[in-house]
Image: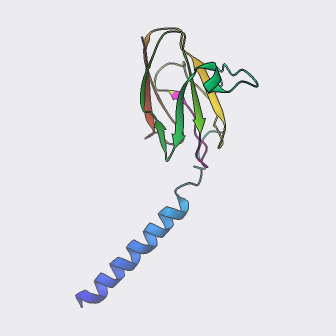
Amino acid sequence: MKKPLVIIIAAVAVVGLAAFLLLKDKPVNNAPEEAANTGISEEPGQPAEARGDKLVFIDNYAYSPQEIIISIGETVTWTNNSQVRHDITSDTGNELGSKLLSQGDSYSHTFNEAGEYDYHCTPHPFMKAKIIVQ
């Protein structure tokens, strides 16, 4: 009697894993369409690397790097490499507030005051990171 139960549990696990793998990159339907889009400092025609921006990439439901240290006046540019839409939203205050970024979209912000800026992705609140401005 134990053998059929083990087979059923294994089958349910395989189906669950398959469903997870198929749905893991699907956007969250209850996510807000856009957040306030403040602090953008994009310069058309000039890539972030050429401007000397610090770069953060969004991939696999994570910001990378998750913590960076910059100087006052430096700009951070986030680029979404994921097929899922993500944003950059301050944990407290409104320093950071991007729209939802589609794959390939970027958001830049110049930090003019020292401090620690914790942020997250609104549709995926487990995605967290920090900018330390010295």
Instruction: Please state if 20 lies on the left or on the right of 81 as rendered.
Output: left
How far from the left and from the top, in percent, is residue 46? Answer: 71, 24
The magenta stretch spans which residues? 81-89
Instruction: Please state if 80 lies on the left or on the right of 47 as rendered.
Output: left
For this rendering, which residue is in front, 8 or 80?
A: 80
How far from the left and from the top, in percent, is residue 62? Answer: 47, 41
Q: Residue furthest left?
A: 2
Report the magenta stretch's main SS.
loop
User: Quick check: is 86 in the magenta stretch?
Assistant: yes
For this rendering, which residue is in front, 55 or 118?
A: 55
Above or below, 74 against 34 in this view is above
Q: Residue furthest right?
A: 45
User: Quick check: is 72 in the magenta stretch?
Assistant: no
Above or below, 72 against 30 in this view is above
Instruction: Please state if 120 lies on the left or on the right of 98 as rendered.
Output: left
Q: Quadrant of the N terminus?
A: bottom left
How far from the left and from the top, in percent, is residue 81? Answer: 59, 43
Q: Residue at x 65, y 44 (%)?
A: 103
